[in-house]
């Protein structure tokens, strides 16, 4: 039995690819594996803000969350996307349970204090109603796993006073994988893994350790924006997860193979 945290971007929720993910999830759950999903919804939130005439304010690449923006995140992330994602999973034989920070305090958080941020000047930056994860209701998630339900967590946390807080979905997924000591954090992306040649999908690298990552950066195989993304993934391993799997452009069975036979699909990142 394995414990898997699956991070889905908001863009996949309404895509045909979700049905492939859902069918593979059913196979994993039927095999008594424990699966939790974390999803974001940035593109949909931005689109709704635009329709409502609200400005999307970004600070050093991060969304500033005022009261109006938080309302949009509630509507989109904890509302429409969570419901639509759960409905698609249900249609494929998976039993999802939609959750957010205020659902049994599933995602516990405190408001992030102002801090100096790279690219935003020397002064501390206040991102508004943005949270830092402080914990999860692990007994609740454990009860759901025992009954073969799949927790589906929207990326909204909640503090002890009942204040909802916006949190980056990748952060929630990484922290949850560490808290559960997950066998794998699976990141569904737009690429089939880490490639030696970005123009050649067949150049997929099946496994990368930290030492190999540093060698691949040194020889130029891994460059540009992929470097910070992989750095963040290796930090997840330091936080308690046993592996990180980068997976995309899915074919039927890819998710199952990536989890049960690491390296057979996508790219698996290992601490050593």
Image: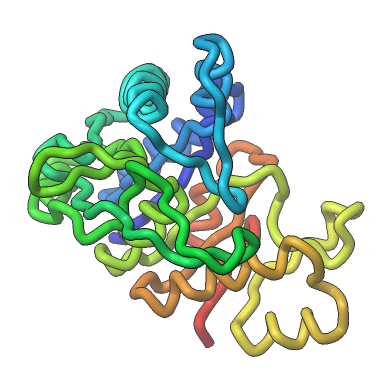
Quarter of the view holding residue 147: top left
Quadrant (top left, top right, bottom left, bottom right) of the N terminus: bottom left
Q: Seen in the image, is 40 located left or right of residue 253?
A: left
Is residue 146 at all visible to an observer of this figure? Answer: no
- Of the pair 247 and 42, the residue shown nearer to us: 42
Question: Where residue 121 sits in the image (x, y, percent)?
Answer: 61, 63
Q: Seen in the image, is 81 located left or right of residue 230?
A: left
- Of the pair 162 and 3, the residue shown nearer to us: 162
Q: Is residue 75 above or below residue 229?
A: above
Is residue 8 at all visible to an observer of this figure? Answer: yes
| Residue plotted at (45% across, 37% down) | 40
Q: Is residue 240 above or below residue 103?
A: below
| Residue plotted at (8% across, 54% down) | 139
Q: Is residue 183 above or below residue 27?
A: below
Question: Where residue 78 sits in the image (x, y, percent)?
Answer: 32, 27
Quarter of the view holding residue 162: top left
| Residue plotted at (23% across, 37% down) | 164
Question: Where residue 87 sits in the image (x, y, percent)?
Answer: 36, 18
């Amino acid at each position: 039995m394995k414990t898997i945290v699956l991070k889905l971007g908001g863009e996949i929720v309404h895509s045909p690819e979700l049905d492939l993910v859902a069918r593979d999830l059913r196979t994993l759950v039927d095999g008594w594996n424990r699966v939790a999903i974390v999803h974001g919804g940035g593109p949909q939130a931005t689109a709704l803000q635009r329709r409502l005439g609200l400005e999307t304010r970004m600070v050093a690449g991060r969304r500033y969350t005022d009261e109006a923006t938080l309302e949009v995140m509630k509507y989109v992330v904890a509302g429409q996307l969570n419901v639509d994602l759960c409905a698609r999973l249900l249609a494929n034989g998976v039993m999802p349970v939609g959750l957010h920070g205020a659902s049994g305090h599933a995602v516990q958080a405190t408001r992030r204090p102002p801090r100096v941020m790279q690219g935003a000047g020397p002064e501390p930056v206040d991102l508004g109603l943005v949270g830092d994860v402080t914990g999860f209701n692990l007994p609740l998630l454990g009860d759901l796993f025992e009954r073969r339900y799949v927790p589906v967590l929207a990326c909204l946390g909640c503090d002890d006073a009942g204040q909802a807080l916006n949190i980056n979905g990748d952060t929630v997924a990484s922290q949850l994988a560490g808290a559960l000591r997950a066998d794998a954090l699976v990141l569904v992306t737009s690429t089939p893994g880490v490639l030696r040649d970005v123009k050649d999908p067949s150049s997929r690298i099946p496994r990368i350790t930290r030492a190999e990552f540093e060698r691949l950066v040194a020889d130029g195989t891994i460059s540009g924006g992929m470097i910070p993304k992989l750095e963040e993934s290796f930090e997840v391993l330091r936080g308690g997860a046993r592996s990180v799997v980068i997976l995309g452009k899915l074919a039927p069975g890819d998710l199952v193979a990536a989890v049960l036979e690491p390296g057979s699909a996508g790219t698996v990142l290992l601490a050593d």
